Image (spheres, rainbow, N blue to C red):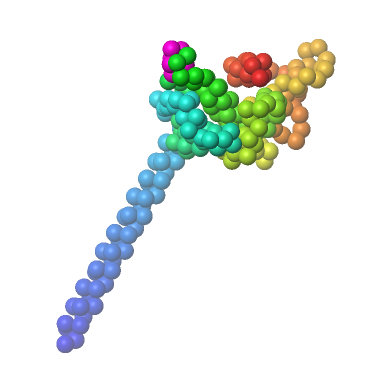
Amino acid sequence: LNLDRKKLVKKLKEERFIDARKISEIEKKCRENEETANIENESPEGRNYTVSVAVPGSILDNAQTHELRTYLAGQIARAAAIFEVDEIVVFDEFSKTTEKLYGFTQNSNILMVKILRYLECPQYLRKHMFPLQKDLRYAGLLNPLDCFHHFRVTDLSVPYREGVVLDKSVKAGRGSFVYVGLHKVNQIFFFCVYSFAKEAWSLRQES
C-alpha cells in the first residue's frame, strides 16, 4: 500500500509539474505576442493602405427632422472612426434629370459633408473654423469622436497639434500667434499650413 501511495504521489507531482510548465509556456507566448503587437502598433510607418467608404447623402432624407438627420450623420462618423476609416466619400445618387422630375435637391449631401467636417475637426478649433450656421445647430449635441488627432488640454507630450493662426499683431520677423488648444497661446516662428485651412476657409465662405 505504501508503495502504491508513493507512486500515486509521485505521479501527481509530475502531472502538476507538467501543468505548471505548460502554464508558464502559455504565459510566455502571450507576453511575446503582446510585445510583438506593441511593436507593430508603435511602428512609425503605419499601414500601407487606406480605407475609404462611399455614402449617399440621400440617406439623411430617411430621417424626419433636422435633429435626427444630424444624429444619423454623427452615427456614420462614429462608425467610421471606430473602424479607422481614412476617407468618407459623400456622393449624389440622383442625376440632374431625376432632380428635375422628382424634385430632389443636394441639400442632404451638403448637410452630410458639413457635419462630417465638423466632427472631424478637433473640438478646440471648431469655434474658429465653423461659424454659427443653421445646418450645424444640433451638431453640438453629438458625442465627440475622440479621434487620434483630437487632443485634450492635458495632452502635452504629443509632438504635433493642429492649430489656427490668430489675428494678433506681432513684430516683423517674430512669427505668428497660433491657438493649438492649450491654456496659453503659442507664438510660432516656423509652421506648416496644410490644405485643411484652405478647405475650412472655403467652407466659411459658403456658409
User: Which sits in the foreground, 154 or 190?
Assistant: 154
Q: Position of residue 44 (x, y in %)?
A: 48, 29
**Which residue is drawn at the image coordinates 57% and 35% (left, top)?**
65
Task: Give the dominant element type of the magenta stretch: helix, strand or loop.
Answer: helix
Q: Is residue 95 magenta?
A: yes
Compared to residue 154, the image places residue 175 above or below, namely above
The answer to whether residue 197 shows anywhere in this view is: no
Left or right? Give the position of 19 relative to 202. Answer: left
The answer to whether residue 177 shows anywhere in this view is: yes
User: Which sits in the foreground, 52 or 106?
Assistant: 106
Q: Outermost residue toward the front?
A: 101
User: Which sits in the foreground, 89 or 154?
Assistant: 89
Q: Is residue 91 magenta?
A: no
- Range shown magenta: 94-99
Compared to residue 200, the image places residue 6 above or below, namely below
Q: Position of residue 124 (x, y in %)?
A: 68, 32
Q: Outermost residue toward the bottom?
A: 1
